[in-house]
Image (cartoon, rainbow, N blue to C red):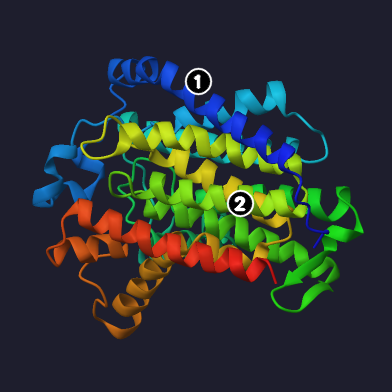
């Protein structure tokens, strides 16, 4: 970790960027809302099973690509005022790449046609009975790929119209690989070291590459999974990016500090419009883009191992899905009433507002713990 820097001037600049970002987002939020309604980019029953739950039926027809408010605001302000080749090019580039993947998924879920994904039993049958021997050979060669595609559906309740889970994983792997290449080969040997809480820097060499890819993929999906209640993802991300702003300040990464603060400002505006009853919802375009940005900014300031703390509620949400999958497919029973875990509490009788605010408080407490650990 770099020496702690207590100069207040960089923090003043970052706060200024946060305020500007908040105001800019407020100014064009009505225009975005109008566009989303005009092109009917709204949540629909046929691709969201949770809308069948009594308390959630009124969410039908709400625009689902509200995350564009954050992504575009942050990207434009950063490109114009904070475009530093060493530190902000790749975070913004990967954020936009992940957001593009999310946007494609959102649009396909609304306007797309049902897509086919063969069951393994069907593939095996075709291998035995297909009239063309070349096709049989091809099906045998690609059988591992078919198994991967089918198995990946376990981690997503996919309706069959948008981007398949295995396609998301591949593109997220590419985003993680770009980040790993940038950090390992472009930022210098210092970034090949990993900061161990209470211990210090440890040089792990090229092993940092798979770690970076894992954390980028895991965090992007974690934020995506948590975007299921009005205000939950937005409010939690405000807490997380505020923590990243503080950590960037005390470690002296001013460009990343400003980027984090800019994101906080846009998130404040988004959450203002997303609190129940939501004017719009984040959608994959926002959750995947911001999840990737969160991971990258934590990695760049060498706080990778603190991600389970500063992204606590998101990791808890994704882990609840993994636990539920294990229970259903290995133990033969559900562990939770419904996953992600915020739906479990909803089905236990908690109101949406109660669930969201309690999750905010728990998340804030763990994030504060993460900041405390980082200071040692």
Q: Residue 331 occupies which quadrant of the picture?
A: bottom left
Can you see residue 113? no
Residue corresponding to mark 1: 24
Circle 1: is it few (<14), some (14-19), or many (20+) Cα within 10 Å? some
| 140 or 347: nearer the viewer | 347
Give the residue drawn at x 28%, y 48%: 229
Residue 55 percent location from the top left of the image: 11, 49
Q: Which residue is at the far bottom?
A: 331
Give the residue drawn at x 73%, y 60%: 302
Q: How many marks?
A: 2
Q: Please state, as top left, top right, bottom left or bottom right, where the C terminus lies in the image.
A: bottom right
Q: Is residue 314 above or below residue 74?
A: below
Q: Secondary structure at mark 2?
A: helix
Residue corresponding to mark 2: 244
| 359 or 46: nearer the viewer | 359
Give the residue drawn at x 25%, y 58%: 355
Mark found first going from the N terminus, 2 or 1? 1
Residue 357 percent location from the top left of the image: 29, 55
In screen coordinates, is 134 left or right of 111?
right
In screen coordinates, is 88 left or right of 316?
right
In screen coordinates, is 349 left or right of 321?
left
Give the residue drawn at x 36%, y 56%: 360
Mark 2 vs mark 1, CA separation in Å = 22 Å
């Amino acid at each position: 970790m770099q020496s702690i820097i207590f100069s207040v001037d960089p923090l003043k600049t970052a706060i200024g960027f946060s305020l500007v970002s908040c105001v800019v987002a407020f100014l064009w939020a009505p225009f975005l809302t109008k566009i989303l309604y005009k092109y009917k980019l709204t949540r629909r029953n046929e691709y969201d099973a949770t809308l069948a739950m009594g308390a959630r039926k009124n969410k039908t027809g709400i625009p689902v690509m509200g995350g564009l408010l954050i992504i575009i605001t942050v990207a434009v302000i950063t490109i114009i005022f904070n475009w530093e080749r060493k530190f902000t090019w790749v975070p913004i580039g990967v954020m936009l790449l992940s957001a593009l993947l999310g946007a494609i998924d959102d649009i396909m879920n609304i306007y797309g046609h049902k897509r086919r994904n063969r069951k393994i039993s069907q593939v095996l049958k075709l291998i035995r009975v297909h009239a063309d021997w070349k096709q049989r050979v091809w099906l045998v060669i690609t059988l591992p790929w078919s198994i991967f595609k089918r198995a990946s559906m376990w981690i997503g309740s996919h309706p069959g119209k948008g981007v398949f889970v295995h396609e998301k994983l591949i593109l997220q792997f590419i985003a993680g690989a770009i980040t790993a290449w940038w950090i390992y080969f472009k930022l210098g040997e210092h970034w090949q070291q990993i900061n161990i809480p209470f211990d210090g820097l440890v040089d792990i060499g090229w092993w940092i590459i798979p770690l970076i890819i894992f954390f980028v993929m895991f965090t992007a999906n974690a934020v995506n999974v948590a975007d299921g209640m009005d205000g939950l993802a937005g409010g939690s991300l405000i807490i997380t990016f505020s923590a990243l702003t503080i950590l960037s300040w005390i470690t002296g990464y001013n460009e990343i500090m400003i980027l984090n603060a800019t994101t906080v400002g846009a998130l404040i505006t988004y959450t203002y419009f997303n609190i129940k009853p939501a004017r719009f919802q984040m959608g994959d375009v926002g959750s995947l883009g911001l999840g990737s940005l969160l991971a990258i900014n934590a990695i760049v300031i060498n706080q990778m191992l603190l991600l389970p703390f500063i992204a606590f509620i998101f990791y808890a949400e994704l882990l609840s899905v993994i636990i539920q999958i294990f229970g259903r497919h290995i133990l033969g029973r559900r562990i939770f009433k419904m996953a992600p875990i915020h739906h479990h509490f909803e089905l236990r009788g908690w109101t949406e507002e109660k669930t969201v605010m309690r999750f905010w408080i728990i998340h804030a407490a763990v994030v504060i713990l993460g900041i405390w650990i980082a200071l040692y």
